[in-house]
Image (cartoon, rainbow, N blue to C red):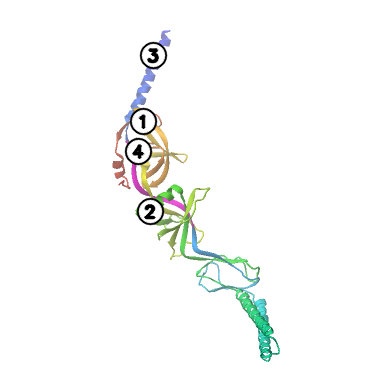
Amino acid sequence: MKKIILTGIIALLCLASCTTKKVEKEEADKFTVTSPVKIDTTFTKEYVSQIRSVRNIEIRAQEKGFLQNIYVDEGQFVKAGQLLFKIMPKMYEAELLKAQAEQKSAEIELQNTKILADKNVVSKNELAAAQAKLQAAKAEVSLAKLHLSFTEIRAPFDGTIDRIPLKLGSLIDEGELLTTLSDNSQMFAYFNVSEPEYIQYQTNVKDRAETKVNLILADGQPFKFKGDVEVIESEFNNETGNIAFRARFPNSTKLLRNGETGQVQMLVPLKNAIVIPQKATYEIQDKKYVFVVGKNNVLSSKEITVGGEMPDLYVVNKGINENDKILLDGVQKVKDDDRIAYGYVAPKKVMSNLRLKAE
């Protein structure tokens, strides 16, 4: 019996010792705690964008025939009016000669009819019919010339030739694709903006410090020229809840090509934004958390939704408010339900030591 009592006393002493050590461990380190701050600010947000030429068209055959000549190469820059392709014109030349012969015959017939009409040998109606026949013959000549002109395909504007799928001698149908032509002197970048961001953009556009946007290319490098947001589409996409913006970029270096991708960086104004230092957060499975100091200095983790990112700072949409106290340093050293000793630092003082100052 005495042995059992002695064992129990030893266990109690061990438990008390462990508990004391745990409390001592919890309070051994003094942590820094601060609070979120509510400010009016702007942050740079990146949007995935599709890059398009200001003009990009398909060059198609307007007549059926054999591809007789190709005067350009893939990737070549061409000028407006430059000859690109020629379809064998023999049949259309023959149609023109035939139409011209019929026009000449109609002219002779009209002259003879006019002489007879002047002598009252034929009626005025026959003269009018001869005149109409000549007009119809002239129309056939114009149509034949038009068809013949379609055998020469010319560039409608300055631009760059894309791939040429057909080779010399190919039999092509009317409307068949010959190549595409891109005017890359300026480029459009299309990107989608959420409804809340659209409202903030439109509401605060006059107060924005910078109205231009940047373009980050696929290699992570910024494009040397800034662009201007010039068009916002008329309606939202019901499936995504987004609306498309279009920015125009100069492209004198011809670096940008139709079909490229990139990321547009745009300044987004925010009113009463909740902002916290990035180092106060930690991540688990792509979700971000902070430790909130609660009653008796006990920590509890809270998931947050990040709405924007600035140097050293996160804009928080949901999860905490400006009255919460959050752990600033040592988030990797603690866990839920730990009790800590801490020193509180005002949020503006914390941010004054970061790269981005809170005004």
Q: Earlier in the sequence, mark 2 or mark 3?
A: 3
Q: Amino acid at mark 1?
A: Gly
**How far across and down, in percent of the image, does residue 7 sit?**
41, 13
Q: Which label lies toward us, 4 or 2?
A: 2
Quick check: 113 above or below 300? Answer: below
Q: Nearer the viewer, residue 246 or 169?
A: 246
Q: Which label lies toward us, 2 or 1?
A: 2
Q: Main secondary structure of the magenta part?
A: strand
**How far across and down, in percent of the image, does residue 36 sit?**
35, 39
Report if the CB atoms under discs 4 and 2 are less than 8 Å apart: no
Describe residue 129's horizontal placement relative to residue 15 as left or right.
right
**Residue 9 circle label:** 3
In the rendered picture of this protein, how many numbered marks are placed on residues? Answer: 4
Quick check: 240 above or below 3? Answer: below
Query: Of helix, strand and loop, which one carries label 4?
Result: loop
**Residue 322 circle label:** 4
**Residue 294 circle label:** 1
Mark 4, residues whose alpha carbon is within 10 Å: few (<14), some, or many (≥20)?
Answer: some
Q: Amino acid at mark 4?
A: Glu
Q: Earlier in the sequence, mark 1 or mark 3?
A: 3
Q: Quadrant of the N terminus?
A: top left
Instruction: Name the residue tied to disc 2.
Output: 205
Report if the CB atoms under discs 3 and 4 are less than 8 Å apart: no
The CA span between labels 4 and 2 is 26 Å
